[in-house]
């Protein structure tokens, strides 16, 4: 196990916080809950962050710069819905959506 990973097993792990969801929720006056992330490979420079309002199934997805640790101004944004986003390349996002039926 790498030395930096060993600290995760201690009472005081050496965390590297990329995004503080509680601080974001307070700043935006919204009850954000972490729902997941898709990070672009191989350079891990950008991520699509999935945030849920109060833990709902629908998520809002926003592009996040892993270097600056900020959401990308005018970056990819998908409004709240039962949607998934995944990187094709740095300029292309594949988006899938759950469709409701009346059956």
Image (spheres, grey):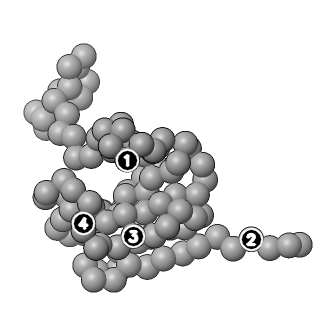
Are there few (<14), some (14-19), or many (20+) residues within 10 Å of tag 4? Answer: some
In the picture of the structure, the residue carrying the numbered disc 2 is 100
In the picture of the structure, the residue carrying the numbered disc 1 is 28
Q: Earlier in the sequence, mark 1 or mark 2?
A: 1
Give the residue displayed 45% in from the left and 70% down from the top.
Answer: 78
Assign a secondary structure to mark 1: helix
Frontmost of labels 3 and 1 is 1
Give the residue displayed 24% in from the left and 68% down from the top.
Answer: 73
Asked whether disc 2 touches disc 3, contact meaning CB atoms under 8 Å apart, the reply is no
Query: Can residue 44 be seen in this snapshot?
Result: no
Rounded to the nearest angstrom, the CA distance separating label 4 from label 1 is 16 Å
Give the residue displayed 47% in from the left and 60% down from the top.
Answer: 60
Image height of 16 relative to 93, above or below: above
- Depth check, front residue: 43 or 54: 54
Asked whether disc 2 touches disc 4, contact meaning CB atoms under 8 Å apart, the reply is no
Give the x, y percent position of residue 2: 13, 38
Give the x, y percent position of residue 62: 37, 63
In the picture of the structure, the residue carrying the numbered disc 3 is 77
Give the x, y percent position of residue 77: 39, 70
Q: Earlier in the sequence, mark 3 or mark 1?
A: 1
Quarter assignment of residue 61: bottom left
Q: Earlier in the sequence, mark 4 or mark 3?
A: 4
């Amino acid at each position: 196990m790498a030395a930096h990973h060993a600290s995760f097993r201690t009472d005081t792990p050496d965390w590297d916080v990329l995004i503080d969801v509680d601080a974001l929720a307070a700043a935006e006056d919204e009850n954000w809950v972490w729902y997941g992330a898709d990070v672009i490979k191989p350079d891990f420079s950008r991520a699509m962050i999935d945030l849920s309002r109060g833990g709902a199934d629908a998520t809002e997805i926003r592009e996040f710069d892993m270097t600056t640790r900020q959401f990308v101004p005018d970056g990819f944004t998908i409004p709240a819905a039962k949607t998934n986003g995944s990187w094709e390349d740095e300029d292309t996002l594949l988006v899938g959506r759950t469709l409701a039926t009346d059956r």
